[in-house]
């Protein structure tokens, strides 16, 4: 579904598809490869892709989504060390019928893609590789029924089929499985956000 968004934007809604986010990421990658002159920015979300143009969208002919196109990562690759000491790790693993070690193994064996940003600066929603044998495990994880009023920066969480790292202390309702010393948001860097949409992430258990 195409929805006009101001005088120089177009919102594409993939909600009717079986895998909306997969379609968002595939079309975003396709448009980035095509490098259309008129496209100023691409802003992905869970079900939609906002395209900003330098002119009236009525003057632009967008390509159809190539269903056979690769959705491989278009950004940088990151490895994030995690201490798996999260407050929800044991209970969450038990709810999933796993041991904590098995849940950690699933988290570290999966390649994650930074799908879109939201909630707070530097907070990236990380989508698991849908071909991963662990993908369904993450899909079954819901948010906590009672959110916490304060979650420390660097907390690693799972919820709603995604993983994420809290960039700063904030309230939140994700299931906490660990923590990292990586700074996800740092105003002293040229690019404050460590992750950008399209980047790939592998988590690695910190052993010392």
Image (spheres, rainbow, N blue to C red):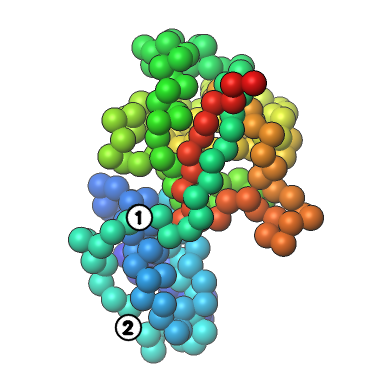
The image shows residue 179 at horizontal and vertical percentages of: 63, 28
Quadrant including the C terminus = top right
**Residue visible at 47% across and 13% down in the picture:** 100
Earlier residue among tags 2 and 1: 2
Q: Nearer the viewer, residue 106 or 175?
A: 106
Q: Nearer the viewer, residue 207 or 73?
A: 207
Residue 188 in sight from this viewpoint: yes
Residue 95 in sight from this viewpoint: no
Q: Quadrant of residue 180?
A: top right
Secondary structure at badge 1 equals loop
State left or right for residue 54 relative to residue 49. right
The image shows residue 42 at horizontal and vertical percentages of: 48, 67
Distance Cα–Cα, label 2 vs label 1: 24 Å
Say which residue label 1 marks.
Answer: 72
Q: Nearer the viewer, residue 20 or 176?
A: 176
Quadrant including the N terminus = bottom left
Q: Residue furthest front?
A: 208
**Number of marks in picture:** 2
Q: Identify the disc placed on residue 61.
A: 2
Q: Nearer the viewer, residue 20 or 80?
A: 80
The image shows residue 53 at horizontal and vertical percentages of: 49, 80
**Residue visible at 70% across and 55% down in the picture:** 192
The image shows residue 157 at horizontal and vertical percentages of: 55, 30
Question: In the rendered view, would you say 36 is above or below 59?
Answer: above
Give the foreground label among 2 and 1: 1
């Amino acid at each position: 579904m195409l929805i006009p968004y101001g005088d120089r934007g177009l919102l594409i809604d993939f909600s009717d598809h079986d895998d909306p986010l997969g379609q968002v990421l595939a079309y975003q990658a396709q448009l980035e490869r095509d490098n259309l002159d008129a496209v100023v920015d691409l802003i992905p979300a869970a079900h939609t892709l906002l395209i900003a143009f330098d002119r009236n969208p009525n003057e632009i002919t967008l390509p159809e989504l190539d269903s056979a196109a690769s959705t491989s990562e278009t950004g940088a690759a990151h490895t994030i060390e995690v201490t798996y000491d999260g407050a929800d790790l044991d209970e969450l693993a038990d709810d999933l019928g796993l041991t904590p070690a098995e849940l950690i193994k699933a988290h570290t064996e999966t390649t994650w893609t930074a799908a879109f940003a939201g909630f707070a600066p530097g907070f990236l929603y990380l989508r698991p590789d849908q071909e991963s044998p662990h993908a369904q495990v993450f899909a079954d994880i819901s948010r906590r029924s009672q959110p916490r009023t304060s979650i420390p920066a660097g907390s690693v969480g799972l919820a709603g089929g995604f993983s994420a790292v809290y960039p700063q202390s904030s309230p939140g309702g994700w299931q906490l499985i660990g923590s990292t010393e990586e700074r996800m948001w740092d105003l002293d860097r040229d690019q404050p956000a460590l992750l950008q949409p399209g980047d790939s992430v592998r988590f690695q258990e910190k052993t010392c």
